[in-house]
């Protein structure tokens, strides 16, 4: 039952939903710094929210239809006992839960434009990674910190996704005002849009 799930369990469900595909523990670790193991692994598989297969020593996870249905609406956190349990997740997992919970619910509040197949998953991955890196919604995050989290995505593909995100009312991409302070990595990470190089990403302010 959903009431048996912890914050960390929900974070994994949201991550798998964002990816929209089968994801290995190694991929989760590289992209988000977490692995689906232990109590969360046993609970999510036991309740039928995640399907896992083992290939060699590697575990590959997929969000099941039941899991998709469960998080197909906002996750309500209240004081009446209906909220997910806090569980025993480490500090990083708890931070990830908080960021993903906010991201997940914001997606349900914001109307979406229809996107070609494959675009939505990458766009939501950018939002999830931004939520981890930003100190608060709307904070400026350098693209030099964002790009390393997308090692399996080409620069041109990520550039297109960043430009596509500008269609959303809560997304901004701006150049660094003081160009002299930019490092080589920051210059390389910039995305060129509208004839200018943009170095800083902000999500969450309208």
Image (cartoon, rainbow, N blue to C red):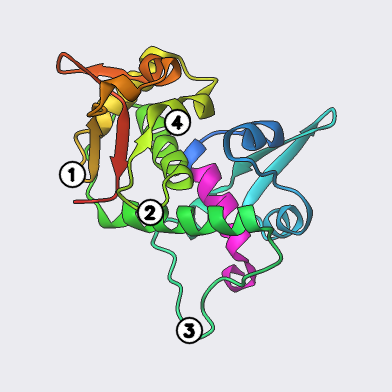
- What label sits on residue 180 in the rendered view? none
Q: Nearer the viewer, residue 45 or 126?
A: 126
Q: Position of residue 109 (x, y in %)?
A: 27, 57
Q: Is residue 183 above or below residue 64?
A: above
Q: Which residues are magenta?
A: 1-17
Real-space CA distance between mark 3 and mark 1, rounded to the nearest whole angstrom? 31 Å
The residue at which mark 2 appears reads as 136
Q: Is residue 102 above or below residue 15?
A: below
Q: Position of residue 86 (x, y in %)?
A: 62, 70
Give the SS element for disc 1. Answer: loop
Residue sticking out furthest to the right: 56
Identify which residue is drawn at 52% across, 29% down. Answer: 149
Q: Main secondary structure of the magenta part?
A: helix
Q: Which image quadrant: the N terminus?
A: bottom right
Give the SS element for disc 3. Answer: loop
Residue sticking out furthest to the bottom: 80
The residue at which mark 1 appears reads as 169
Is 123 on the left-hand or right-hand side of 194? right
- What label sits on residue 146 in the rendered view? 4
Label 2 crowd bin: few (<14), some (14–19), many (20+), radius 10 Å = some
Is 165 on the left-hand or right-hand side of 62? left
Which circle, 3 or 2, is nearer the viewer? 2
Real-space CA distance between mark 4 and mark 2, rounded to the nearest whole angstrom? 15 Å
The residue at which mark 3 appears reads as 79
Which circle, 2 or 1, is nearer the viewer? 2
- Magenta span contains residue 10: yes
CB contact under 8 Å: marks 1 and 4:
no
């Amino acid at each position: 039952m959903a009431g048996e799930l912890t914050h960390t369990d929900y974070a994994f469900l949201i991550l798998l939903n964002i990816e929209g595909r089968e994801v290995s523990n190694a991929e989760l670790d590289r992209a988000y710094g977490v692995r689906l193991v232990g109590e969360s692994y046993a609970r999510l598989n036991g309740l039928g929210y995640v399907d896992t297969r083992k290939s060699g020593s590697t575990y590959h996870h997929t969000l099941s239809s039941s899991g998709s249905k469960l998080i197909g609406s906002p996750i309500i956190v209240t004081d009446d006992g209906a909220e997910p349990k806090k569980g025993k997740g480490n500090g990083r997992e708890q931070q990830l839960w908080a960021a993903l919970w906010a991201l997940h619910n914001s997606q349900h509040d914001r109307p979406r434009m229809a996107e070609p197949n494959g675009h939505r998953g990458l766009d939501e991955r950018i939002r999830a990674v931004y939520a981890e890196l930003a100190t608060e919604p709307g904070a400026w995050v350098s693209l030099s910190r964002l790009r390393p989290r997308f090692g399996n995505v080409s620069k041109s593909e990520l550039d297109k996704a960043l430009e596509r995100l500008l269609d959303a009312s809560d997304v901004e991409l701006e150049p660094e005002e003081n160009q002299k302070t930019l490092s080589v990595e920051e210059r390389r990470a910039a995305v060129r849009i509208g004839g200018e190089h943009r170095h800083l990403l902000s999500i969450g302010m309208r």
